[in-house]
Image (tube, rainbow, N blue to C red):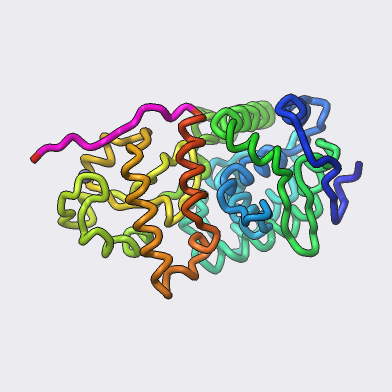
Amino acid sequence: MSHKLQVGEMSVAYLTDKDIWSHFNYIYSPKSKNSTTYKFVLIKSIIENLYNVNDKLELSYDRIFSSFAKIYWNLVIHHDLNQINMVGKRAEVQNVLLSLQEKHGIPNSLVFDKLSNELQVDTIMKVKKKCKINVMGAIYGDTSGAIYDFDNKKEFIKINSSFYSFMQRFQKVLTYVTNYHLALFLEKFNEQGDTTKLLLSVENVSKRTSLDHFYYVLESFYGGECFYCGKKIKNKSNSHVDHFIPWSFVQADQLWNLVISCSTCNLAKSDKLAKENYLSALIDRNNQILGMTDMRGREDMQIYTPSKLEQLYHFSIDNGYTDFWTPIASD
Ligand SMILES: [Zn+2]
């Protein structure tokens, strides 16, 4: 099946877990001809956007390629890693990024979210244009059209519902496996580059450096008190924008999953899930946000529903987040 396809329709309606595991085995095997890192990064991008689908399980290219461009930029520019299996050659998306870097005189140290807004948008558009032709049809072809529909004109994919449920149930292990295979590929085809602690770099390649802009949106909620323990937050420096569902699981930053907490709570909670009563508190807070005209138009709020957050909470338990946390009542 050609990867230059423009439209691909889903070939099967129902897939068993066994079918899906065998598709993943194939994608990660030498048989699937991964001459570049595109497929690994596409899977990472879909995982990052798992809760950004609409009620028909459709996911826009803009969302997919915002993640894709960010990950690729951080790998190619920030970590200086080659993305193709040939010495002296470069993957096409790599060329796109390197020429943008040169044109704007950007130092290697800069991570994607430190670029200006305009430049981020420009990069995402250019990456999307390249990947529409090179990437969307490749995984579609590898899985014989089983896991998603795609349409390069309308620019969205529609995820097979059994595949979607599989991704939710095995999200954590799929993230591990994908990072592992991406790191393995990069290690093989990079002699100089930044290959020390490669797996760690790959695991953190999606991470934003600063969540400050969320702080300013959220600071007025809860009367300036910590979401968890209720202590007054004196200033920004002794507080944190906290991922309610841990970042290590969601790998994404959406307003509806973020709260402001004091440093003590943020450190103590760390990678754990807060007790269920906090889930209801967050749903209430999000309802409050949805009631505000200037806030509900935000991109991340448009796809939010309380049931989405509940699902995410329960799937994180299914994925092994079973160590529940609650602040110790101190005073
Ligand atoms: Zn606190």
Looking at the rendering, which quadrant does residue 122 occupy? Answer: bottom right
Secondary structure, magenta segment, majority class? loop
Counting labels gives 0
Residue 37 place in picture, x, y as percent? 70, 38
Q: Quadrant of ligand 1?
A: top left
* Residue 97 appears anywhere in the view: no
Residue 330 place in picture, x, y as percent? 11, 37
Horizontal side, residue 244 vs residue 188: left or right: left
Looking at the rendering, which quadrant does residue 99 occupy? Answer: bottom right
Horizontal side, residue 229 vs residue 165: left or right: left
Residue 242 place in picture, x, y as percent? 34, 47
- Residue 325 colored magenta? yes
Return the residue nearer the eye: 144 or 11.
11
| Residue drawn at point x = 59 percent, y = 57 percent | 101
Q: Residue furthest bottom?
A: 293
Residue 258 place in picture, x, y as percent? 38, 51
Q: Is residue 327 above or below residue 29?
A: below
Q: Residue furthest right?
A: 1
* Residue 284 appears anywhere in the view: yes
Q: Is residue 124 above or below residue 325?
A: below
**Numbered range of the magenta stretch:** 320-330
Quarter of the N terminus within the rendering: top right
Return the residue nearer the eye: 203 or 197.
203
| Residue drawn at point x = 29 percent, y = 52 percent | 260
Quarter of the C terminus within the rendering: top left
Return the residue nearer the eye: 1 or 297.
297
Q: Which residue lies furthest to the left in this view?
A: 331
| Residue drawn at point x = 87 percent, y = 50 percent | 4
